[in-house]
Image (cartoon, rainbow, N blue to C red):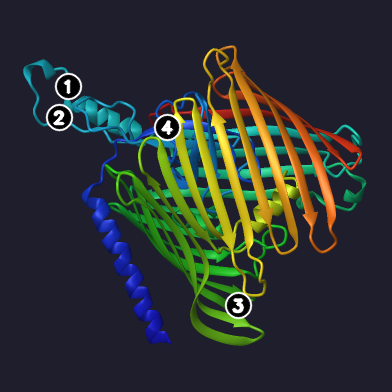
Amino acid sequence: MEKNNCIYKRILFLLLVLISFQASINAQTNIKILDGTVSYVNAKSIYVKFYSTKELHVGDTLYTYQNEKPIPSLVITRLSSISSVCELIGNAQFKIGDPVKGMIVPSPIPTIIKDTLQKPTIKQNITESDTSIKVTNTDKVKEIKKNKSLINGRLSVSMLGDFNQPFNSKSTRTRVSNSLNIGNINGSKFSLESYINYTHNYSKDQIGVGFFDEFKLYTLALGYQLSKNKQIWIGRRINPNISNMGAHDGIQYEQKLGLFSYGILVGSKPNLYDYGYNIKLEQAGAFLAHNANTKKGYIQTSIAFIEQRYSWKVDRRFTYFQHSSPITKNINFFISAELDLFKRIHEENINSVNFTSLYANVRYRISKKMSIQSSYDNRRNIIYYETYKTIIDKLIDQETRQGLRLQYSYNVFRYLSMNASAFFRFEGKNDIPTKNYLFNIYMNNIPKLHVTLSASTNYLKTDYIQGMIYSGRISKDVFKSKLNVELNYRKINYMYLSSETKTNEDVIGANLSFQLSRLSSVLIDVESTFANHDANYRYYITVLQRFKNSKKIKK
């Protein structure tokens, strides 16, 4: 068995080297970054708002950033003038106000691109008209850039309430969220990453709930730049090279070698039940990664070997692999997988190679108007430590995550696009497969009216529930996109097959989004649910302030 494991590791390593070698041939860094913000989240879609979406297209990938490294997180399915509707890839969890970025690869035209990630270089052939370009100026730019301090953060305060029971409802709560990333603090070699949430529930059954039950520390780590290519982190942090593994408590060391990076991590993993600190869940491992910007797009590959223990007894050994790349200009591929090499079950040691987690996604943009996508997911169910999803949204999310999904998108013309998807999951214990069919139609910025319309149907059938959801949405930007007004409606009909119990719900909502400034916004959402002769009225208010500082500081 050890021989098989050794062969398997060598195969994965060779695969990593081959992929990275191909990427390094085409590597370049002419990438333009577009900043966006999550404005709405439901069971199947995530809405991201930009100042303009002129340079984005259906099928493009949106990224979240961790330690200045892009992580593929969303795929655009529909676009309006300033907003995009996206589907989730990977394990990232989004909330209103979260930052998202788009990466634009410009066409190879003979112009100077200012907004790039490329390091300043000196022109080799300087003509008489180029006498203003001096080597000393370039050296100063490099020196200043080396010592600059970058601040990127956001602070949001949210209030979710129930008009029927203002202080006793389980849905009445206040949430404060703070995310702050500082690179090269005050021009030093220290950096900080933090993401902290505090949610207080006002219902009576919360008596006895302690502060740390409501306080969630998702990231809090201090980094130190040992040298140009060496860095060490201490604290709780998600490593962007192995992001789907989640957070790690302890020490992480990373070293870069050209387009490659490698490192180790030693410490523990967070407590499964409350995401607290548990020193008994020891964890250690090593990783190797490759990151490159190419003419076709962004390529990222990483592989890791991890050992997890409980009270110093080996509990699990596994390999983690993640890869994202454009196979061609129009085909994008993403895969993440975990393979167990060792497990300890009921005091019995098991040495075997088993796939315990796999997610793969392939997107093919046939033309500017048409694209198809296929994904397969058998990852473990996600644990939500915080969520604002309704019962039906959580049910759909749970039942349609593990399985095979096929999707087709078509832009009929400039203002009209359609999207259809089918999901299937077959389980040996059940004769009836889980089925989910989804159809969307989207009309963007209709001429003269300047409104955006969307409508969708969602059919779900499992071995115990069957139902249909109809929904519609209309929105309009006013005051030069400083204010977005939206009305939405959902009709929910579903039935439990074992008891033939039926549930009918009508959900009506209104949303106002105020863009007070480039970094400040206010979101107000009001929703009414009518079900079985009962009415429930809820509100959701968020004040969001972002912080961004790109000033260059000299020592």
Quadrant holding the C terminus: top left
Q: Is residue 151 above or below residue 284?
A: above
- Residue 181 at least partly seen: no
Mark 2 or 1, closer to the camera: 2
Q: Could you tell me residue 58's position as x and y percent?
A: 44, 37
Q: Which residue is mark 1?
A: 133
- For residue 312, which numbered disc appears in the image? 3
Question: Residue 370 lies in what quarter of the image?
Answer: top left
Q: Could you tell me residue 77's position as x and y percent?
A: 50, 39
Q: Is residue 405 above or below residue 430?
A: above
Q: Could you tell me residue 469's position as x and y percent?
A: 70, 43
> Alpha-carbon distance for marks 2 and 1?
9 Å
Mark 3 or 4, closer to the camera: 4
Quadrant holding the N terminus: bottom left
Please state which amino acid type lies under the numbered disc 2: Lys
Please state which amino acid type lies under the numbered disc 3: Trp
Q: Tag 4's secondary structure?
A: loop
The front one of 408 and 177 is 408
Query: Residues at badges 3 and 1 in contact (C-beta under 8 Å)?
Result: no
Q: Which residue is mark 4?
A: 56
- For residue 123, which numbered disc appears in the image? 2
Q: Residues within 10 Å of mark 1 (few under 14, many from 20)?
A: few
Mark 4 or 1, closer to the camera: 4
Please state which amino acid type lies under the numbered disc 4: Leu
Give the mark, 2 or 3, whose residue is nearer the N terminus: 2
In the picture, measured across the screen, residue 191 lies left or right of residue 111, that is: right
> Alpha-carbon distance for marks 4 and 2?
31 Å
- Residue 131 at least partly seen: yes
